[in-house]
Image (cartoon, grey):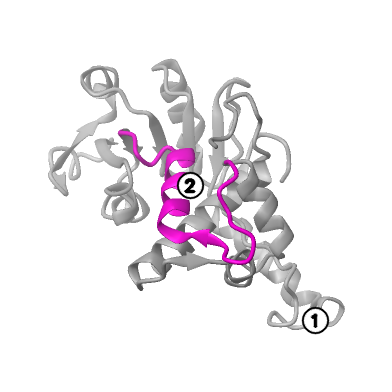
Amino acid sequence: MPASPTRRIPEATVARLPVYQRILLELVRAGTTTVSSDRLAEMARVNASKVRKDLSFLGSFGTRGSGYEAEYLLAQIDRELGLDGDWPVAIVGLGNLGRALANSHGFTSRGFRIGSLFDVEPSLVGTRIRGVTIRHLDEFHEAVAEDPPAIGVIATPAADAQGVADLLVGSGISSIINFAPRVLAVPPEVLLRYVDLSIELQVMSFYLSHRDQLGTVAASPALPHAVGLTSGEPA
């Protein structure tokens, strides 16, 4: 039975669903037909009751004693994550990071595709990445009118990030991923997520500095697996 469309899935659960999805995809590719919540929990490094609770938001399709049918569960998570849709992505900033993102298979599979690329560097404008021409940021409104992006990605220097965010929001883009090391101001209805390596390094340094209290990595099942930060409520 599918989850009720009015039932709110907690943000912490949403953050774990891609982890389960990746695990299940690998298991299915390896020929696994059924998977237990205990095995999913072990591979995701969470407890089994949390796995069962997370999956209960998607519906009731596990079988006591035999677990979940792996391919069906994968399909349900794909559906909940919207991976069966078409999500054009616009990347602004094609320096080393932006080019790496544009070349990433993560943006060319599972429903996502690079729809447009933008920069202001003359040597980059007019060149192509994976068949998509880099356009000048001055052409942004014209370009996105041709293929409206579902998601905007900011990979610019920090000093330029807020201006780009304003441009994205002003163009009607309400989902933004920010790779620039800067906190952005956007309207409350805009979904904004941060992916910042320096933050992840600081989180890692915290756990390294507190190993004596927390135990070793292998002995600490509660260590976090961050998938990004959000402007919404904490996980």
User: 81 or 211, which is in the foreground?
Assistant: 81
Q: Residue at x 59, y 20 (%)?
A: 189
Q: Is residue 81 magenta?
A: yes
Residue 93, image x, y percentages: 34, 42
Residue 32, image x, y percentages: 41, 70
User: 60 or 81, which is in the foreground?
Assistant: 60
Q: Is residue 120 magenta?
A: no
Q: What's under tag 1, amino acid-wise? A: Gly
Magenta stretch bounds: 59-86
The residue at which mark 2 appears reads as: 77
Give the Cα separation between the discs numbered 1 and 2: 33 Å
Answer left or right for 57 relative to 178: right
Mark 1 or mark 2: which is in front?
2
Answer left or right for 187 relative to 99: right
Question: In terms of secondary structure, where does tag 2 sit?
Answer: helix
Q: Is residue 38 above or below residue 91?
A: below
Q: Residue at x 59, y 53 (%)?
A: 16
